[in-house]
Each structure stands twice: as C-alpha cells, then as structure tokens.
Amino acid sequence: MSEVTELAEKLKSEGEKMVSIFSGMNDSLWQQEVYTEGTTWTIRNVLSHFVTSERGLVKLFEQIRLGGAGRSPELLPDCPPLGLSCCYCGAVAVPESFAERGGCDG
C-alpha cells in the first residue's frame, strides 16, 4: 500500500470517528464548557474552530498546488487568529483574539 493511499484511508477513518462522536452529542453536551480561561469555549466553539481551520488549510493547499507561496509572510504577525496554536506558524494566542475576530480567517 502506498503512503498516499495509507494516509487517505487514515484520514477517512479518523473523519468517520469524529462524525460519530459529534453526531452522538445531545444539546447539553454541545454547550459543555471545555475552556474557561478568558473567553469561554464550548464543544460547539471547538468544533467550529476545527472546521474553520480545515477550510483554511484546504485553501492554503490549493494555493500552493497552483504555484503560490502559501500564506503571505506579512500576515504572520497577526497569527494566530485562532485561540489555540496557529495552523500555519505554531504560535499560540489567547481565546479573546479568536472571539474578537469572529473565528479563524486562515
């Protein structure tokens, strides 16, 4: 089995696990607070962060595939717009910056 096929199967398998976990949650679990330092994050907020980050990565990969350099270096000082570690540079920010910006703009 090639590395690409193995990776694709792993991503599919892990994606199916995430769908299973999140689709099995009731309303009260979605509102469960999981991070309360500064701005409060619920499970719903964390999943929104994951989805937004993944969308940003898809855009980044497509830009690179088309010959672009990826994320522009001048944007890195504002990085991360996330509240955890940045998908692009690994820097860490506080959740307030994520909430103020309305989510990741990666």
Image (spheres, rainbow, N blue to C red):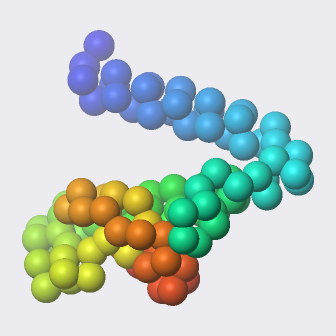
Q: Is residue 28 visible?
A: yes
Counting labels gives 0
Lateral position of residue 7 relative to residue 73, left or right: right
State which quarter of the image contains the C terminus: bottom left
Between residue 14 and residue 39, name the one nearer to us: 39
Query: Hey, which residue is sitting farthest front in the picture?
Result: 37
Q: Is residue 59 above or below residue 43?
A: below
List x then y, in percent, for residue 66: 19, 67
Q: Is residue 41 left or right of residue 27?
A: left
- Image location (x, y in percent) of residue 64: 18, 64
Q: Quadrant of the N terminus?
A: top left
> Where 72 falls versus 85 (above or below)?
below
**Foreground residue among 24 and 38:** 38
Along the line of sight, which residue is nearer the eye, 92 or 101? 92
The quarter of the picture where residue 33 lies is: bottom right
Q: Is residue 28 above or below residue 15?
A: below
Q: Residue at x 88, y 53 (%)?
A: 27
Q: Residue at x 82, y 42 (%)?
A: 25
Pick the residue in front: 62 or 72: 72
Image quadrant assignment for residue 4: top left
Seen from this angle, which residue lies furthest right?
27
- Residue at x-position 27% and y-position 74%: 79
Estimate the x, y position of residue 39 in percent, counting from the top left.
58, 72
Relative to 19, 92 lies left or right: left
Q: Is residue 88 visible?
A: no
